[in-house]
Image (tube, rainbow, N blue to C red):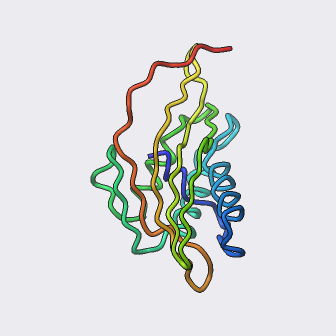
Amino acid sequence: MMAVLGVVGGGWPWWGDSSEASLRSQLQQLAQLLSASPSDRPATRRARIDAAVRSQLASDARLRIAELPHVTVPGPALTDALTALVEPGEAGDVELTRIELDLRGDQATAFVDARLAGDVGRDLHAPHRQVTLGLVRRGDGWRIVDVEVPARKLEEPEPRP
């Protein structure tokens, strides 16, 4: 789900060069927009994520997220799920640890390993998720048209350094 992750950016358009470097940079910026600091106000964070969903996902995007089988199109349910990734008052950093791109003209597929790291209790939890994004370049830039996030594998918390 983080993918969706990791996927959206508040008011941040995906236009410009379609090169791999440009798309990688845009995906990394998106991850930063989905991250949360302990000082984030819940309403502010939700508004930022909602704007990102509306601006980055095509209105006809198809969503297949294992933990959210009822969320199949962008909208309030997706915004709520992304906002709930991090509890208010806690930190959560979305990191993209691997991005592989397959660019074909006005279409691209991004294979992403995403990680949500946050302080929970005394352990540093950092679940990794594999996300596949389908993108198309439309008149106003790149838009995500397909998101696939398979079921999460159970992982032990990493000990705090």
- In the depicted view, which residue is nearer to us: 116 or 50? 116
What percent of the width, then of the height, locates residue 28?
67, 52
What percent of the width, then of the height, locates residue 57?
50, 68
Direction from residue 35 to residue 54 in the image, left or right: left
Direction from residue 147 to residue 7 in the image, left or right: right
Q: Which residue is drawn at 43% across and 24% down?
A: 155
Q: Which residue is drawn at 67% across and 49% down?
A: 32
Q: Residue furthest left?
A: 70
Q: How many labels does the image show?
A: 0
What percent of the width, then of the height, locates residue 146?
42, 65
Vertical position of residue 49 compared to residue 94: above or below: below
Vertical position of residue 61 compared to residue 98: above or below: below
Q: Residue furthest bottom?
A: 139
What percent of the width, then of the height, locates residue 53?
52, 63
Vertical position of residue 104 compared to residue 32: above or below: below
Direction from residue 55 to residue 59 in the image, left or right: left
- In the depicted view, which residue is nearer to us: 85 or 29? 29
The C terminus is located in which quarter?
Answer: top right
- In the depicted view, which residue is nearer to us: 11 or 132? 132
Q: Residue at x 36, y 66 (%)?
A: 62
Direction from residue 146 to residue 56 in the image, left or right: right
Q: Residue at x 62, y 41 (%)?
A: 95
